Amino acid sequence: MSFINGRAFIGVSLFLSFLILLFTSVWLFSKQHSVLIALIHTMIGFIMLLVVIWHLVKNYRPLANYINPLKKHLGKRNYAFLLAFGLIAYVVISPFFSMAPALQVYQFGQSLRAADKVDQDEELKFVKRAVAADDAKGQTVTIELTKGPYFMWPQYAIWLETMDGEFVQPLYVTSKLANNEFTNKVSKKDPDQVFTSHMFIGENAVGWDVLTGGNEPETKDDRMRPESLPVFLHKLGMKALNGFFVPTDDSLTVDGYSGATMTDNFIYSIQLPEKLAGQYRVKLEMNHSFDYNEYYSSDRFPDDPVYSGNGFSAQPSVIYGVDVDFDDNSGQLNVMKLLGRGHHSGQDGVLYKDTENLTTALELVDRVIVRQKS
């Protein structure tokens, strides 16, 4: 292959691969998921990897000098490897701990995908998770959730109750709520600023620039969120010393009903401890901070310390539900319907039927399907 200029081939290949990866990366980041674009992105990425390996083989000596911090370059100490390693390590770790800039980049991407909601692809990606205790003997309940355009990082709980409204057991609870471990305690830079629209999505989005803080609270008692999912929390019945209905121990985690917030469409299955007979009701409660609107503005309840506090609760939680017959083993699909909302500051566990003042909160989910099988 002497007729090929190796250096030129590597350079052109990397340049063309970079252009295609740049296009596909922007597409996947800003648009609804496309399997075709993802496939192109993966294949070009693989080709680019092979070319990079070839490039490293041909230039391993200079690279070895760059990696070695003891080697001097042009008479100066070489810290390129340490700086590059630190930068890459931080970028990789930051999404796991919601650190900047990962959180801001994620929010920006969600904003772009929300704007693209009219042109959503029919083909969707789902996260699949299954839970079953070793001694579980009951039916398996499966919840399939297709997220809406304003689903970013909500808190949610799914539970089972009798037809009379008696709480039976949780099915899934986001870990921050289950452990009362809310972070990102922020406040407004300008205390007089009023928010009347979603802070992170839409034409009037203001983002994190208007907020300050972001430090973790010193204790759990300093960061309670009774307004997050008030209907579920009152059903759960755990009460803190200050009177708030919030989890006060690790029982939800120990029982295996909690986990990280699934931020994509998901199919979640859980096997019940014991077999059930007859009809029961499966409910879902979901809430998203910072989703203000004209009615649920930041100054709507100025004398309410919870609503006007550092939780930025904005629109209240929304509750969906569906009846499931455990005597029916056909695997019938049951679609959840909107039932109402929770209290805006978690003062009670009442399911309020009026939802006319809700806007983007009604677009957190597109569809929720429940089924049970023996």
Image (cartoon, grey):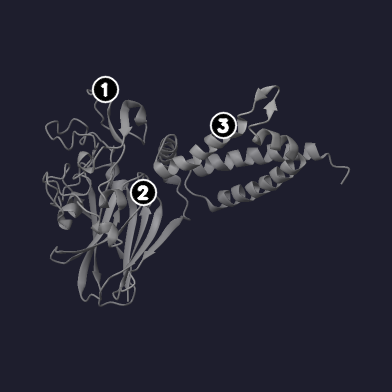
Q: Earlier in the sequence, mark 3 or mark 1?
A: 3
Spot the residue most to the right.
2
State whether residue 206 appears in this view.
Answer: no
In front: mark 3 or mark 1? 3
* Marks 2, 1: nearer the viewer: 1
Front residue of 70 and 359 = 70
Mark whose residue sits in front, 3 or 2: 3
| Mark 1, other Cα within 10 Å: few <14 / some 14–19 / many ≥20 | few
Instruction: Tell me where residue 56 appears, x and y as whole percent.
Output: 72, 42
Q: Callout 1: helix, strand or loop?
A: loop
Q: Which mark is residue 83?
A: 3
* Percent coordinates x, y for residue 196 in the rendering: 25, 31
**Relative to residue 238, is residue 215 drawn left or right?**
right
Residue drawn at x 17%, y 67% as measured from the top left: 162
Dot 3 alpha-carbon crowd within 10 angstroms: few under 14, some 14 to 19, many 20 or more: few
Q: Amino acid at mark 3?
A: Leu
Which of 304 and 315 lies nearest the eye of the viewer?
304
Q: Is residue 181 left or right of residue 148?
A: left
Left or right: 251 with respect to 97? Answer: left
Type of the residue with mark 1: Asp
Helix, strand or loop at label 3? It is: helix
> Label 3 to label 1, Cα distance in Å?
36 Å
Label 2 residue SS: loop
Q: Position of residue 248 (x, y in %)?
A: 19, 51
Q: Which mark is residue 337?
A: none
Q: Residue at the location (35% across, 35% down)?
A: 200
Q: Which quadrant is home to the C terminus?
A: bottom left
Q: Which residue is mark 2?
A: 148
Circle number at residue 190: 1
How busy is the neighbourhood of tag 2: few (under 14 within 10 Å), some, or many (20 plus)?
some
